[in-house]
Image (cartoon, grey):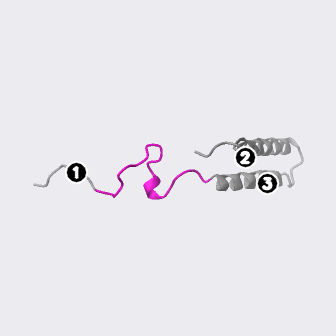
Amino acid sequence: MASTEVEPVDTGWTHEPVDAPSARFGWHGQARKSFMIAGWFCVIALLCMMIGNHIGHVEDIWLVVIAAFVAYFLVKGTIGKRGRWAK
């Protein structure tokens, strides 16, 4: 009959950081530049949606407000990171 105990596998890592357990798989941190590019693309796409065949301006107001909201957080994230020490 086969044993039910699992043998530990030696991966070659002696210490794995607690805050980044996926570092051994090659992923460490966030893709901030990609997030910024995607965010600005969304802002431009929202503003381009104002061009259309709708009669009322309620849609335009919603599009501008949402685009401004997203742009605010993109700018806040860029300006807020200046002068901080990299961790």
Residue at which label 1 appears: 6
Q: Is residue 59 left or right of residue 2?
A: right
Q: Quadrant of the C terminus?
A: top right
Chief SS of the magenta region: loop
Distance in Å between CA atoms under marks 1 and 3: 54 Å
Task: Indicate whether residue 16 is drawn in magenta.
Answer: yes
**In front of the other: 14 or 54:** 14
Look at discs 2 and 1 and give the one toward the viewer: 2
Residue lying at 79% horizontally and 54% vertically, measured from the top left: 44
Mark 1: amino acid: Val
**In front of the other: 81 or 39:** 81
Counting from the top left corner in percent of width and height, residue 67 is at: 78, 46
Q: Which label's residue is closer to the chain start, 1 or 3?
A: 1
Task: Indicate whether residue 2 is drawn in magenta.
Answer: no
Question: Residue 44, labelled with which disc?
Answer: 3
Q: Which label's residue is closer to the chain start, 2 or 3?
A: 3
Counting from the top left corner in percent of width and height, residue 73 is at: 73, 42
